[in-house]
Image (cartoon, rainbow, N blue to C red):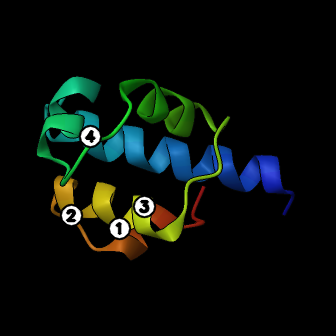
Amino acid sequence: MEKSELLKLIGKNIKIIRENKGLSQVDLIGKMEGLFDPTNISRIEAGRNNPTIYTLQRIADALEVPLVDLLSLEK
């Protein structure tokens, strides 16, 4: 799997989970610990940003799901 495909898949997972929980991107950022640039969520969900494991864990915590749910490679 290519890097760009992997980033898009992770971003799609985040977006699906976020939307299923009825959260906007702004809501998600509000639930995250510490400061986070709002444009980063948009870039991550679009697969245009390569988030660190720490950032992915913060997103998972804010979404109240295990990190593995964000990293699922099921299409």
Instruction: Kindly identify the amino acid type of the residue bearing the numbered disc 4.
Output: Arg
The residue sitting at 26% across, 33% down in the picture is: 19
Instruction: Kindly identify the amino acid type of the residue bearing the numbered disc 2.
Output: Asp
Q: Is residue 5 above or below residue 57?
A: above
Earlier along the polypeptide chain: callout 1 or callout 4?
A: 4
How far apart in space, not on screen, are marks 1 and 3 (Cα)? Answer: 4 Å
Residue 40 screen position, x and y as percent: 47, 33
The residue sitting at 50% across, 36% down in the picture is: 45
Count of numbered marks: 4
How far apart in space, not on screen, are marks 3 and 4 (Cα)? Answer: 13 Å
Residue at which label 3 appears = 56
Residue at which label 1 appears = 57
Instruction: Kindly identify the amino acid type of the residue bearing the numbered disc 3.
Output: Leu
Earlier along the polypeptide chain: callout 3 or callout 4?
A: 4
Image quadrant assignment for residue 25: top left
Residue at which label 2 appears = 61
Closest to the camera, between mark 1 and mark 4, is: 1
